Image (spheres, rainbow, N blue to C red):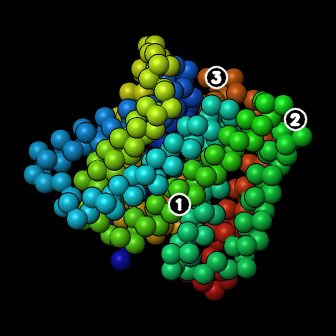
């Protein structure tokens, strides 16, 4: 049966909204430390969704599912989003989105590792091309020999680690077929929020936390649109569409993020960045293109 139209509408919302959250994260980081940024965001969003679910359906996911939601929250939001936020401390928001465009590679690999479709020779070629784009991106910084160059490379690697966490979590979410999409979104965000707040507390971030009108507005946007709407939409699309289709949102996000970063915070868009982005997206297209005679 064809996927429901609502699932494609949810996927489109993910494509558009998450493309804007990279800029919002960049703005919020001006006064909000990274772990607390994610922790506050997900704890508030999770708490709101829990209240909505209680009043709407009368019940949250059963307690037997909570450990799985905790694992998914830790992988997709703790490692996945947390890695992107940390990375954006040292790399531009548009560049972070270009790096996340490698997500379909990790999606394919994690799905295969968890018993899904075997990685084909074509996919290996696509992986090599895509990762050559990542290498092109960080290559000059490897030889700078200063703290700025090292932070840049570390930021790129953090975003790739975030992709791994997100991909593994997405594959597990698809396999586990949990009972409630909105309830699952609530529990995963609540668990991830608590985890990130604990991490921020351990790192002493509360002493660095301040607010301005701009950072508060950015955080509210991340809670309302990035978490309450887009994350729930992502889980809904993931439950009703093939994981290969859902992962293609990573094509759209960099275009929006690079455009917004260039227009609003004067982030550079150099020929090297354009070439690296082209290689990453070309590799993803090869990985996701059906084989001849396939469907």
Q: Quadrant of the N terminus?
A: bottom left
Left or right, 141 with respect to 70, comes to right
User: Closer to the camera: disc 1 or disc 2?
Assistant: 2
Q: Position of residue 227 (x, y in %)?
A: 38, 41
User: Closer to the camera: disc 2 or disc 3?
Assistant: 2
> Badge 3: few (under 14), some or many (20 or more) residues near its Cα, within 10 Å?
few
Please, is residue 9 above or below residue 199 in the view?
below
Which is nearer the N-term, disc 1 or disc 2? 2
Q: Quadrant of the C terminus?
A: bottom right
Which is nearer the N-term, disc 2 or disc 3? 2
Residue located at (53% from left, 56% from top): 165
Badge 1 vs badge 2, beta-carbon distance below 8 Å: no
Left or right, 209 with respect to 7, comes to right
Q: Would you name the residue on which mark 1 appears?
A: 167
Compute the Cα span from label 1 to label 3.
Answer: 29 Å
- Extreme residue toward the bottom, this view: 293
């Amino acid at each position: 049966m064809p996927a429901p139209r609502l699932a494609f509408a949810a996927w489109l919302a993910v494509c558009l909204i998450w493309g804007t959250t990279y800029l919002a994260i960049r703005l919020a980081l001006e006064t909000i430390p990274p772990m607390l940024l994610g922790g506050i965001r997900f704890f508030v969003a999770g708490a709101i969704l829990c209240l909505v679910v209680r009043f709407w359906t009368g019940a949250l996911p059963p307690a037997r599912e909570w450990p799985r939601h905790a694992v998914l929250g830790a992988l997709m939001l703790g490692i996945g989003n947390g890695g992107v936020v940390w990375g954006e401390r040292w790399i531009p928001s548009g560049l972070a989105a270009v790096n996340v465009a490698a997500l379909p590679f990790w999606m394919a690999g994690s799905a295969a590792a968890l018993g899904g479709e075997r990685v084909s020779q074509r996919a290996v070629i696509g992986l090599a091309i895509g990762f050559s784009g990542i290498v092109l991106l960080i290559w000059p910084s490897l030889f700078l020999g200063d703290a700025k160059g090292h932070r840049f490379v570390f930021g790129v690697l953090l975003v790739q680690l975030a992709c791994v966490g997100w991909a593994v979590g997405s594959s597990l979410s698809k396999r586990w077929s949990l009972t409630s999409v909105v309830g699952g979104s609530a529990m995963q965000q609540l668990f991830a929020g608590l985890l990130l707040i604990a991490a921020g507390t351990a790192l002493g971030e509360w002493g660095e936390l301040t607010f301005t009108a701009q950072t508060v507005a950015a955080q509210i946007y991340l809670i309302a649109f990035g978490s309450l709407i887009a994350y729930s939409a992502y889980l809904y699309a993931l439950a009703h569409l093939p994981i290969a289709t859902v992962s293609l949102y990573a094509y759209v996000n960099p275009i929006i993020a690079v455009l917004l970063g260039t227009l609003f915070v004067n982030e550079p868009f150099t020929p090297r960045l354009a070439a690296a982005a082209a290689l990453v997206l070309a590799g993803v297209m090869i990985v996701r293109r059906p084989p001849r005679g396939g469907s």
